[in-house]
Image (tube, rainbow, N blue to C red):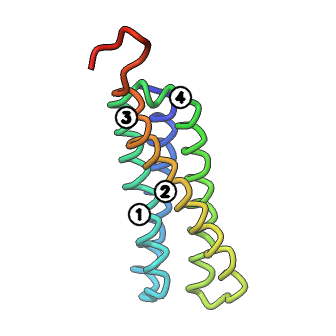
């Protein structure tokens, strides 16, 4: 399995553990005010990271490109900052709001890089090369 896939799966498991921990904390306390952070942790951290890892596992050529590792770093940084800052914001700490906004943009950039990898790099491979290329 490509390294970027392994990293996405490892990070996904960490986010899953954090998301389950948040869910348990809400259930035990009866206070569900951080449900948005819980949902973001599970969907962006666990599910989306696992889907990225699966895509790269199935597309080893794309996983071997440096851009795949950059995408991993950008996306993971965004979600890793978003989760605790959103948690704090939902707990009533308004000072966390700029961090939520910035981390959301970073995570979006990670998704945009992934979209480029999926769409633009796929078209590049289909383009004929050289003077003897047959169309």
CB of mark 1 within 8 Å of CB of mark 2? Answer: yes
Upstream in sequence: badge 2 or badge 3:
2
Q: Position of residue 15 (x, y in %)?
A: 49, 56
Tag in front: 4 or 2 = 4
Left or right, 110 with respect to 58, comes to: right
Q: Are marks 4 and 3 in contact (CB under 8 Å)?
A: no
- Residue sitting at x 39%, y 42%: 118
Q: Mark 1 vs mark 4: which is more N-terminal?
A: 1
Q: CA distance from mark 3 to mark 1?
A: 29 Å
Checking the image for residue 122, the label placed there is 3
Q: Secondary structure at mark 1?
A: helix
- Mark 4 or 3 closer to N-term? 4
Q: Nearer the viewer, mark 3 or mark 1?
A: 3
Q: Residue at x 53, y 29 (%)?
A: 65
* Numbered circle sitting on residue 42: 1
Quadrant (top left/top right/bottom left/bottom right) for the C terminus: top left
x and y percent of residue 92 in the render?
62, 91
**Depth check: 96 or 68 in front?**
68
Question: Which quadrant holds residue 100?
Answer: bottom right
Asked if the residues shown at circle 4 and circle 2 are in contact, with their CB atoms under 8 angstroms apart, the answer is no
Q: Which one is in front in this view, the residue at disc 4 or the one at disc 3? A: 3
Residue extending farthest to the left is 135
On the image, the x and y values in percent for residue 29 come to 46, 85
Position above or below: 53 against 99: above
| Residue linked to disc 2 | 15
Callout in the foreground (2, 3): 3
Instruction: Identify the residue position indicated by label 4 in the image.
Output: 65
Residue that lies at the very extreme toward the top in this rendered image? 132
Instruction: Give the answer, above or below, for where 128 lies relative to 92.
Output: above
Helix, strand or loop for disc 4: loop
Q: Residues within 10 Å of mark 1 (few under 14, many from 20)?
A: many
- Mark 1–mark 2 Cα distance, whole angstroms, equals 7 Å
């Amino acid at each position: 399995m490509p390294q970027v896939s392994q990293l996405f799966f490892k990070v996904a498991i960490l986010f899953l553990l954090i998301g389950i921990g948040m869910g348990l904390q809400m259930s035990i306390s009866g206070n569900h005010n951080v449900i948005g952070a819980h949902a973001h942790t599970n969907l962006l951290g666990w599910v989306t990271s696992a889907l990225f890892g699966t895509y790269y596992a199935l597309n080893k050529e794309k996983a071997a490109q440096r851009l795949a590792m950059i995408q991993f770093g950008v996306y993971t940084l965004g979600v890793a900052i978003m989760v605790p800052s959103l948690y704090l914001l939902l707990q009533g700490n308004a000072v966390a709001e700029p961090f939520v906004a910035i981390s959301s943009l970073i995570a979006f950039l990670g998704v945009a890089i992934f979209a480029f990898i999926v769409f633009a790099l796929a078209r590049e491979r289909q383009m004929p090369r050289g003077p003897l290329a047959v169309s």
